[in-house]
Image (tube, helix red, strand yellow):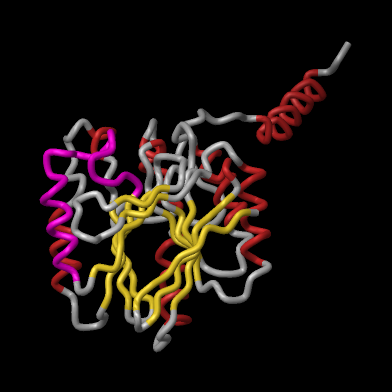
Amino acid sequence: MIKRGVLIGLCLGFLLTGCDLIEYHPYDVRIDGETNINLKNIEKIQQQCAGKDTIRFAFMGDSQRWYDETADFVKHINKQDSIDFVIHGGDISDFGITKEFLWIRDIMQGLRIPYVALIGNHDILGNGKEVFEQVYGDENFAFIAGNTKFVCMNTNALEYDYSHPVPDFDFISREAADSARYSKTVAVMHVKPYDDQFNNNVARLFHAEIKKFPSLQFALHAHNHKLQTTDVFKDGIIYYGCASMKQRNYMVFTLTTNGYSYEVVNY
């Protein structure tokens, strides 16, 4: 017969050792590990690129469930010496599940250079927006690399049922007003105008507003899982779209005093 004290001890031992076995809900927003990544890496980008006339950055997106492909992307980038930073164009996750964000975060943390990430339409599912804000930061943000300002915007209007200002014209206006510290601009978003997730009632207004930034060079987007080069408004401003990580390629842009160039890199 087991004594009462021994039985209590066994029960307590089970409870204590069993804590690690607790499985939280997939949309639970408890975050282990690094948070506020964008702000930390923006500081690094701005410091490292200060005073540079030539800026080179990699653009990729839609990592979603392609973990091995994303890990191989990191390894490929790390073999290069001329790229200053990486921009992830959004859809970090597939279903907005916390673990999906953390899996990609941990893979991307293997980069030797800083990176920033935008929010994609899949990242808003469930409690994904809250997870994104904890891990990466604000849904809209901007930074300056050399003499170029990168304006990164949430354009995933459909996921909000138009109940949230997407795109946020107040943010765009504030950033456009601060034009003394840079001479060129790159606009970055997950969904481009006239795609299904964009609020196409304001597509032309959005384009007109981002053109108010000093010397808008081009715009970048992800979302469509394929390489795209589109003069959406027939005015010479090109919207460049990157493929998903499944396709095993990414884009590298080079900004110089004389303009810009880009290439597609397969890995």
235 or 36, which is in the foreground?
235
Quarter occupied by residue 112: bottom right
Give x and y (percent) for residue 190: 35, 47
Question: Is residue 91 in the magenta section?
Answer: no
Q: Indicate left or right for 72 with 41 as reference.
A: right
**Residue drawn 42% across the image and 86% down it:** 52
**Residue drawn 45% across the image and 65% down it:** 262
Q: Indicate left or right for 200 with 65 as reference.
A: left
Question: Is residue 211 in the magenta section?
Answer: yes
Q: Indicate left or right for 188 with 109 as reference.
A: left
104 or 197, which is in the foreground?
197
Residue furthest to the right in view is 1
Give x and y (percent) for residue 47: 44, 82
71 or 82, which is in the foreground?
82
Q: Indicate left or right for 66 with 180 as reference.
A: right
Asked if residue 184 is positioned above or below residue 234 in the image, the reply reads: below
> Over which residues does the magenta segment extend?
190-213
